[in-house]
Image (cartoon, grey):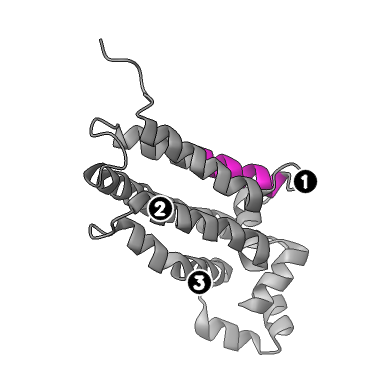
Amino acid sequence: LDAAVRVIALRGVANTSLADIAQEAGVTRGAIYWHFANKADLINSLWEQVVHFYAPLTEASESEDEPDPLGKLQELYISFFTGMVEDSLQQQLFRILFEEGDRSKDTEAIRQRHRQLRQERYWGLQIVLSNAIKRGQIPPDFDVQLGTVTIFSMIHGLIANWVMNPELVDIKKHGPLVVQNIFRMFRSGMELGPRQE
């Protein structure tokens, strides 16, 4: 898996074969096929590593017993932004997702898996925000669905801009501030949707 990241970082997904990865890893191509059905399967295994790394914080933020759901979610995002800067695997995976020029069958399979992960995260965020209402962290009439869309849009936009223009966005520095501002807005009871008459 580490060899795959190194090769893909140099050549891109479309120009990397399992044979290239096997050569970089110092194993036979058969050994690669023993573990992975194809290139997309291998890269999706890399995604699972990332998801597994953040699973404890994700589960804690969604727990009904968590006394500070927004604080735990903020901790998750700060950890995530730091990981994106310091972990070459995460950087490369997000570059694959946002690289518009590579629309191969393999990258489409990777994007499909990421869409599934985003959908799971969408429902998870609704749980976090519902728990935050129960804990009195945000007003009882807060629009959970719109709040989830707001978080999704801001975080996705931040990541996309950092991947495409890292010189413009310091995600490790600005990411936590963006999250703090979103939650400050939520806590203040600022209306996200149209005013009800």
Check if mark 2's residue and mark 1's residue have beta carbons within 8 Å.
no
Residue 103 counted in the magenta span: no
Task: Say what secondary structure mark 2 lies in.
Answer: helix
* Side (left or right) of 143 relative to 173: left
Q: Position of residue 188 (x, y in %)?
A: 38, 31
Check if mark 1's residue and mark 3's residue have beta carbons within 8 Å.
no
For disc 1, the marked residue is 167
Q: Which mark identifies residue 49?
A: 3
| Residue at 30%, 32% in the rendered image | 143
Q: Amino acid at mark 2?
A: Gly
The quadrant the N terminus occupies is bottom right
**The quadrant where residue 160 appears:** top right
Instruction: Name the residue nearer the viewer: 61 or 164.
Output: 61
| Residue at 59%, 43% in the rendered image | 158
Instruction: Name the residue nearer the viewer: 177 or 14.
Output: 177
Of the image marks 1 and 3, the number of the one nearer the N terminus? 3
Of the image marks 3 and 2, the number of the one nearer the N terminus? 3
Q: Which mark identifies residue 71?
A: 2
| Residue at 56%, 68% in the rendered image | 43
Q: Amino acid at mark 3?
A: Gln
Residues in magenta, as a range? 154-164
- Mark 3 or 2: the one toward you: 2
Task: Say what secondary structure mark 1 lies in.
Answer: loop
Q: How many marks?
A: 3
Label 2: how many Cα within 10 Å (few below 14, some 14–19, many 20+): some
| Residue at 36%, 32% in the rendered image | 146
Q: Amino acid at mark 1?
A: Glu
* Side (left or right) of 63 relative to 153: left
Q: Position of residue 163 (x, y in %)?
A: 67, 49
Q: Position of residue 42 (x, y in %)?
A: 55, 72
Please say whether residue 101 is visible from this viewpoint: no
